Each structure stands twice: as structure tokens, then as C-alpha cells.
Image: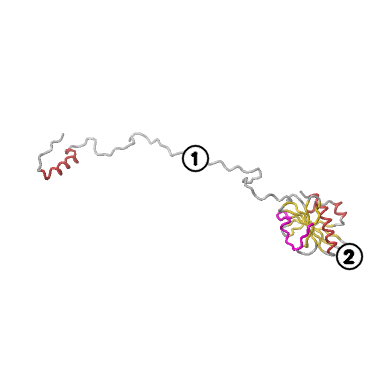
Amino acid sequence: MCAVPRIPTAAAAVALGLLLLTGCGGDDPAGDAPATTASATSPETSEPPATPSDPEPTPTGTDGSDGSDGPADDPLAALDPCAMVDAAGLASLELTGGEAKEVGEARACRYRFEGPTLDESFTVSIELFGGHGAADIVATDVQPLPAVGSHEAVTFTGTTGGCVVSLAVTETSRLDSTAVGGDAALACDHAAALAAAAEPALP
């Protein structure tokens, strides 16, 4: 134990504090190097934390979709408008031609009926709408008709004139049979006849 010299009382506290701080003036044989928590001779053995593996991808449907509910496929996509009425049916309607067309958003097939006069001659078409149903018809004179086969039917005047007979397939798809030219009443007869001939091919 260190001997504490007798010092006047006024300086006793200061002297005692200095002695305690210096450790009585003794040298520390181990030196003043700070202690370390790791051994200087031990190699570093820690490894970076493992990275979690990538999450499994979300399963997709067999059609390549992400499984979410989306718009239904066009139920008329597989139909060729020029193949819906066979040659015998076209002959019975006295229709010639059969030219594939794009009419706005519809896929169409255009035929010709040649009557004895110009007033009795018509261009008659099948038009398939895969994204628009009967509720989407833009006309002011839409009138219901008796069902054609298993499909509800309406008639109206087309945007280019003539008569249209429309068959509903789904809420967002339909077939329009259009006859343009000549007498309006005769036009509706030809449109209705072509719609009836094409109806069995509809889903």
C-alpha cells in the first residue's frame, strides 16, 4: 500500500487524488495497451450472413397468364366469317363472292346478291364483333326480333344505311348480318336470311 505523506489539510485532497491517478507512480509491466476482445493470433472465422434465397416465382396459368382474373377471350376468335355458311347455303341464298374485310372493329365477309333490278340488288355481309355486344349497338331504332336459333336477335339501321340483323352471342360479342342497297324491306329479308344461315356456326 502506498504511503500517504502528511500534507497540510488544504492540499490533502488534491495530493491524494494525484497519487491515486498515477497508481503511486508505479509502472504497469503490461503496458497501457487497451484490451481487445479478439485474440491477435486467432484467424478471422466469421462469415457474412447468408443471403436468403430468391422467393419462388408466382405460378402462372397454363396459358401463360398470371392467374389473375382478366377479360374473357373472344368467343368468336376461332370463327372465319367467310366459312360460316357453306357453298350450298350460299347458293340457296343466291349469294356470290365472299370477300374477307375489316369493318371497323369487326371481322367481316362480304357477299353480293344480284337481283333483276338495281333496287333488288344488295351487298350482304356477316360481321363478327368480339369486343362489343348487343348493348353496345349505336342506333336509335333498335327493335327486338324473335330469337334466331338459340340467340337473341334485334334489328336496326346501320351507320351506312341498309338493314342490320344482330345476334347476341355474349354480353361482349355479337354477329351482325347487314344488307345494303335497294329496297329497305327487301334488305331486311336478305339480312335475316343470312343471319339464320350463319347462326348454327355460333357458339
Residue occupied by mark 2: 117
Picture quadrant of residue 29: top left
Residue that badge 1 annotates:
52
The answer for how far apart the CA atoms under marks 1 and 2 are is 82 Å
Question: Could you tell me which secondary element the residue under label 1 belongs to?
Answer: loop
x%, y% of residue 1?
Answer: 16, 34
The magenta region covers 129-144
Q: Percent from the top left, x then y, of residue 160?
A: 77, 64
Crowding at label 2, few (<14), some or many (≥20) Cα neighbours within 10 Å?
Answer: few
Numbered mark located on residue 30 in the image: none
Q: Is residue 189 magenta?
A: no
Residue 177's quadrant in the figure? bottom right
Q: Residue at x 87, y 63 (%)?
A: 120
Tag 2 or tag 1, which sits nearer the N-term? 1
Between 185 and 55, the residue placed more toward the observer is 185
Asked whether disc 1 touches disc 2, contact meaning CB atoms under 8 Å apart, the reply is no
